[in-house]
Amino acid sequence: MPSKGTNRVSRAQPKPHSDGPMKTRHHMVAPVLSALIPGSGQIYNRQWIKGLMMLLLSGFAISYFASTLRTAVWGMITLGDVPSRLEEVNGRSVNVPGDHSINLMIQSLIVLFLFVLYLIVYISVIKDAYRTGRKRDSGLPPATFRQTLTFIHDFKFAQAMLVLPGAGILFLTILPIVFMVLLAFTNYSSPHHIPPGNLVDWVGLDTFAQLFRLSSWSGTFLGVLGWTVLWAVVATATTFISGLAVALVLSQKEIRLKGIWRTLIIIPYAIPQMISLLAMKMMFNGKFGPINQYLSHFGLGQLPWLTDPFWAKFTVIIVNIWVGMPLSFLLISSVLSTISPDLYEAARVEGAGRWQQARIITFPFIMFAIAPILIIQLAGNFNNFNVIYLLTNGGPSNPEYQFAGHTDLLITWLYKLTLNNNIYNIASAIGIILFIIIAGFSIWNYRQTRSFKDEEMTQ
Amino acid sequence: MINRMSTKFRVIASYLFLAIVVCWSLYPAAWVVLSSFKPGKSLYSESFIPKSLTLDHYTELFQSGSLMFSTWYMNTFKVAIFSMLLSTFLVTITAYALSRFRFPGRKASLTLVLVLGMFPGFMSMVAVYILLMQLGLLDTHMALVIVYSFGSIIFNLFVAKGFFDTLPKGIEEAARIDGASNFRVFTSIMLPLSKPMLVFVALTTFTGAWVDFIFASLVLRSKEKWTVAVGLYDMVNSYQNAYFTLFAAGAVFIAIPITILFMYLQRYFVDGLTAGANKG
Amino acid sequence: MKRKQALGGLAKVSLFVLTLSLVITTACSNNANDPNDSKGTGNTPDQSKFDLTFNKLETDLVPEPGASLLIWESKEARPFVEAIMKEFTAAYGVEVRMQELGTMDQIGKFELDGPAGLAADVITTSQDHLGKAASAGLILPNDEFEEATRSEHEAVAVTAGSYNNKLYGYPIKVMTYAMFYNKDLISKPPATMEEVIAFSKTFTDPDRNKYAFMFDAPFFYFSYPFIGSTGGYIFGNNGTDPADIGLNNEGAVKGMEVFASLRKEVLPISAGDIASDIKTTLFSEGSVAMNVTGSWFIETFRQAGINFGVAPIPAIGGNDSVTLSQVNSWYVSAYSKYPNAAKLFARFASNKSAQLLNYELTGAVPTHKEAAQNAVIQGDEITSTFYKQFSNSHSAPSIPEISSVWVPMDAAMVEIWDGNDGKEVLDRAVKQIRDAMSLNAKQGDKPSEPGSTEAPF
């Protein structure tokens, strides 16, 4: 299996050096040179193209960091010295721009991230010079540029493929998350610490301390957390079970026109949630919504779908099934269709009934393929912003809670804290706690799934 | 005889069940469609089918001076197509590398991606805003394409990787013995086999661009750059006057391309997956 | 084989979708003119009822050479902004563009776009966002035209445009709500809530969706008369002292009793089900006799073709009803490249002629004293009623602490409407507001921090 190869040195066709073995010290000289001037070690090793590329890259990097790194470190430590302010010039107020703490923090992060990346390149350039030097010491010629490329293609194919996606994720996802985490350790909050008219400062763990000192906050946190967990579990289970039920029913061989049924069933997925949820909100209106109008037509009582704490929770779950079932259905359907009919045939020959066939063949198959997706859905439901925000906006309100209602999830609560109240630091602290809970749970769970432990089931 | 009876009963019950599911799925959709023909601004109506119907909202979508629906539509189309292409490429190479190769840090990377998907995204949006500002990409469609595509790696990786996991190892080993390089194995053996997965990823990113209003409204700051979702949300998010019926008409226009795509692709998606897996 | 067909199908579909959308967009794009670049196609003031003159302002301030301006205003204000932009360009030769943006969303967007250099030069918002904008250093004070603004506009409007005793705003219009009533259903508007209850007994019939009196009970903004009329208030000292919260005082509790009684006697719907959207429809259909809402709905009801009038909100607990009011003002961006041109525009678009024009084109209620005294406006029953209600209103506070008030108070309104004890709920809401404020304030307590004191301007 060549893909397993993580060899340090290419063993492709070793050719003895024409000069024969000689006591050389290339493995010392090359890395030292590269450490001083990255790329020079490669040139010393007669790897011209690689060396030149590294030289160019380093030249570019050094000129970039020379002008930015100091500011970045200073910005990260101080978060700015002078806020922007108004000054009188000839009797007129003029805005004098100062340091914008938040922008400064993000800009510094970008530079620091780039710098770490460059450091990694720098170290590998030194390592590479050392390795090639060793190779030359043992009398082998240095790899040509073409050989290097072939080596990457043959043995570092996966890593090479991952460079672009990795860089994108680093800057577009990881960097913003690091920024958000850092906010929890500042005093960035309305009304006194909103830049650019004010500076934001580091406050250490103060934010967390406040969050737990104020009982109304910690009470809200625990209450909302409890419902969030319940919601995530129930919402995931109900969409999965309903998707499974519909998929199983539709997969029976007696059912005709499968394509048409399938199309009709997945239509909810094609309608933007923003639209369907606002429509649902209207439909579930206890007084004027069509659902209660029908109920009273049939002489049944009207239900407080969105206004009673219990029923509101019930309604969001029901609506979530509507929203989420089609995707589960689609995924499960496709897994079902991968199960070979021979398996069922064999089971039938062994005398297994329909239920037994389902139990020994269908469910294990589905679970193997779907389990990681279920975990992702579960985590997604923890953060299911749309359904709650657009349908109930957290309501009905809970008088015991600080800025939260009965159906508020941690994420919608966070949104209210940031958007309505601009308490960014508290919101960030809550976000971190939320993240630790979800991530811990998911990692543990994911590592339990067979798809992680034993990925070669189909072998 | 009893067996036949019970089969018949089971089939009838199944059809009944499916009919109920379809009614439940279609009712809100039908409600939105009907609302779009309703006069006035409100979705509220005394009866399921409004007393009078009008096409006014559709004409207003395209003729009103303050709405730029056709521009938004074109913008969305552009963003959706390009994000679809870029994200399919990125997701495929990422999932392929993480599924078919073994290298140090592989499991850690997988766990990292899993975890990253769980962060409440909107809180870090400010950082993305500043990053795009530094790159001079604010208020451009390119920014949206980039953000959507890299975002889709995180959301689609596990589906895609799961798919590659199910492809038998035998295929590529046979190809390698024949002297095929990594690149060739990927492009001429694995890629053709993974069409259903590609369709899945393409489809989800394509629809994503049509429905996202949170991120798009952060990146696209001027009205002529908006996508339809941003424009529609703006119609109902106004504190003073909400245009629900106009919103419904716009919604119908978003749902049409997505539904048509789905109608054709889902069959292909499911059938294709079967074909891929049964080869092994 | 099958897959090939499917792929062929796929190609066809995408082609179909592509052509469909192309046809749609190209067919229709001709009609859509570009509103972001409109340079004034609104009514020309030549046909105006008023004698309007738009000359250069009397000041030595001149626009920067090559200046051009971007304005943010709401959809509803478009006709006015387009007209005034045209006049401004004619007077000063400065190009002006408008972008539509709701007045409630402007500061949030400005926080990001200002420093990024994408924001407008002149923005519009109401005073409940002013404190945040001013303390964050996002806007410039109204220094050039301070004296003129103070003397020409209503005191409430000047207060609304000021923060920390500094004037920032260039007032545009007054925003408050009053009671619309359907003249075909109720000939004379009731003067007190008792009369409303009496009328309701003869009219309200929930089974047929007939309601005598509807208002957005779950929103504190619209329920404020039941606090403010009987002695409650948000912040003391004219809305400037966050330590003095008057939302659970005796008067507020008394008003809440009237509020709760309306649930039983007038509007038997739970708070969560009162959607303003439905309320508007029902009033437009003639199913609701009285509807409390803002002046921005005048046009909607006119189009619906109902015979309506506007009256002040009926007296509560024997006191004239006090509403919560806002003043929309222009504010000049601290990030504007052309602050002089921007200041000139803000002043130009808020003087007497501009406000009369605004009234004429959008029905805006003026803040300019002379404009408000104009015979045409005085003779306009609807506008003068709104003006009357405005003069009997509390101005929404402009200090940034106001942002901690809305959410707990909205929740409290829902609670009380749905039958909980008024005193208890209000006390709890006030505690929440204090908690939220203390959280923010605490971090400012460190004496050594440079940013901890009030911004030094």
Image: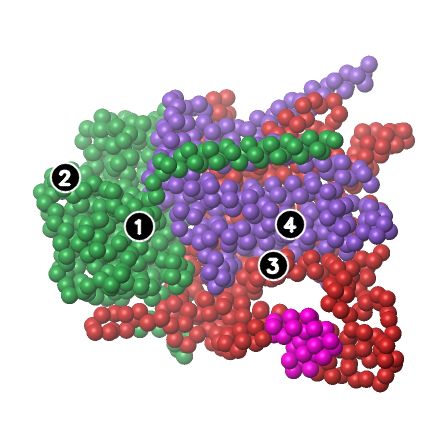
Chain colours: A red, B purple, C green
Image height of C445 relative to C326, above or below:
below
Q: Residues within 10 Å of mark 1 (few under 14, many from 20)?
A: many
Name the residue carrying label 1. C98
Q: On the image, numbered disc 2 is attached to which residue?
A: C47
How far apart are labels 3 and 1 at the CA level? 37 Å
x and y, in percent, of residue C140 in the image: 28, 64
Q: Per the image, is B243 magenta? A: no
Query: Do the residues at pointers 2 and 4 share their chain?
Result: no
Residue B184 placement, left or right of C424: right
The amino acid beneath tag 1 is: Met
Query: Chain letter of disc 1?
Result: C
User: Given contact means CB atoms under 8 Å apart, are the residues at marks 1 and 4 in contact?
Assistant: no
Camera-near label (1 vs 4) is 4
At 46% from the left and 73% from the top, the residue drawn is A79
Q: Amino acid at mark 3?
A: Ile
Q: Earlier in the sequence, mark 1 or mark 2?
A: 2
- Marks 1 and 4 sit apart, C-alpha to C-alpha, by 40 Å
Q: Nearer the viewer, residue A394 or A212?
A: A394
Q: Residue at x 73, y 48 (%)?
A: B187
Residue that mark 3 sits on: A169
Q: Nearer the viewer, residue C382 or A88?
A: A88
Residue at mark 1 to residue at mark 2: CA–CA distance: 23 Å
